[in-house]
Image (cartoon, rainbow, N blue to C red):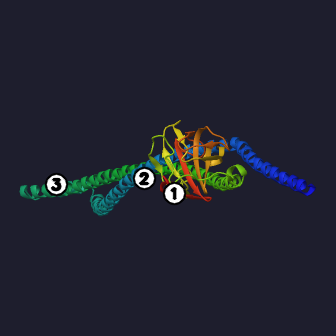
Amino acid sequence: MVKRLISFTLASVLLLSTVSYAAKSVSDLKSELAQSQKKTEETKKQIQSKQAEKNSQKAKKDSLDVEIAGLQSDIDKIQSVIDEKNAEIDEKNNEIAVLEDELQATDKRLKKRMKVIYESGTESYLELILKSTGIADLFTRIAVVESILKHDNNIMDNYRNDIAEIAAAKEVVEKEKNEQVEAKSILAEKQNQIKAKQAESQKIIDALSKDINELKKQEAEQEKAEKQLQSQINAALKSSSQQSVTYSGNGKFGFPLTSYTRISSTYGYRIHPITGTKKLHTGIDYAAPYGTSILAAEDGVVLTSGWNSGYGYCVTINHGGGYVTLYGHCSSLLVSAGQKVTKGQTIAKVGSTGNSTGNHLHFEVRVNGSTVNPAGYL
């Protein structure tokens, strides 16, 4: 009789210990989720803010790229003008060289002629005329003198014309040079503008890189949270209340929304909309308006109901048989951990909490702890 009493007492203690441990595990799970809610909500807001800033900075960078392209076009045009001016300057310089050669030749002829005039003096012309022997000879001598004077005048006129042409040519060259200097000044200004724009663009790129690195850290934390979530689910499944759940379905789940069926992101690898990296998307995203009712996909018992990092407000349901469904990014939750639910029951409302870029339902199906494509179970 005493032995039976001792055995009964020990069994009772063990049973109470098991129940207490299971209750503690669920309580701890809810407490940890509640404590992390404030911190993860702040992280979510930071991620969303950085994403908005990233989009804004990308738009600015695209605008800068357009400006830089426009400035480069202007530079190319100015360089074309400079090349044309250089060609014109070379041409004018060649003309000056030719004129200078002619001037030197003219100068030599003029000096020679001036020497003759200087040596003979103006009286020599008069003496030449007075020494004429007759009328015919007089006119002949006068004609010779006129010819000499005309020749001398032509030399002087040509000399003056050459000087004027050279001066005009030099003026043109100077004008071309001034235009070139002005064009170079414009070019330098444009180049400085480009450098300033490029520096500004580089700052934006650096800021984007910093934001992306920060977002990648956030993503790593999200992945860690997913693993922790699975551990929590596994721990909750070991509790006495969850072990009693028996799967009664036929392998197909009900649709988790009332009427909205548009898929905004499928299951599988994709470019993450926030971090821009290629990652496995562990569920299906269904686009739906804020506040749309979310339905339990099958009968079961709620494993967790609360905040879970990147998932935002999230519900997980144990359907038995190793099947667990997850409903993420909810705006509000209508069930609590340990509560029994039936297929089609409203358990939450659509929102955009956690790492989300818009109102939608993130729906997951997990079999024996591993995510699978929900499309095969609907």
Write down the residue under mark 1.
Answer: 373
Crowding at label 3, few (<14), some or many (≥20) Cα neighbours within 10 Å?
Answer: few
Query: Closer to the observer: label 1 or label 3?
Result: 1
Q: Position of residue 258 (x, y in %)?
A: 48, 40
Classify 117 as above or below 59: below
Instruction: Residue lying at the far front in this picture: please name it.
Output: 1
Write down the residue under mark 2.
Answer: 72
Q: Is residue 185 visible?
A: no
> Circle 3 sits in a helix, a strand or a loop, which is it?
helix
Horizontal side, residue 177 vs residue 159: left or right: right
> Circle 1 sits in a helix, a strand or a loop, which is it?
loop
Could you give the CA–CA distance between mark 2 and mark 1, rounded to whole angstroms? Answer: 51 Å
Q: Position of residue 214 (x, y in %)?
A: 63, 52
Write down the residue under mark 3.
Answer: 146
Q: Is residue 43 visible?
A: yes
In the rendered image, the quadrant that contains the N terminus is: bottom right
Q: Residue at x 53, y 35 (%)?
A: 291
Instruction: Residue lying at the far right in this picture: please name it.
Output: 2
Q: Residue at x 85, y 52 (%)?
A: 13
Q: Are marks 2 and 1 in contact (CB under 8 Å)?
A: no
Classify 358 as above or below 273: above
Could you give the CA–CA distance between mark 3 and mark 2, rounded to whole angstroms? Answer: 67 Å
Residue kind at label 3, given as amino acid type: Glu
Q: Residue at x 27, y 58 (%)?
A: 117
Query: Closer to the observer: label 2 or label 1?
Result: 1
Residue kind at label 2, given as amino acid type: Gln
Q: Position of residue 359 (x, y in %)?
A: 52, 41
- Mark 1 or mark 3: name the one nearer the start of the chain: 3
Which is nearer the eye, 188 or 331?
331
Horizontal side, residue 181 vs residue 51: left or right: left
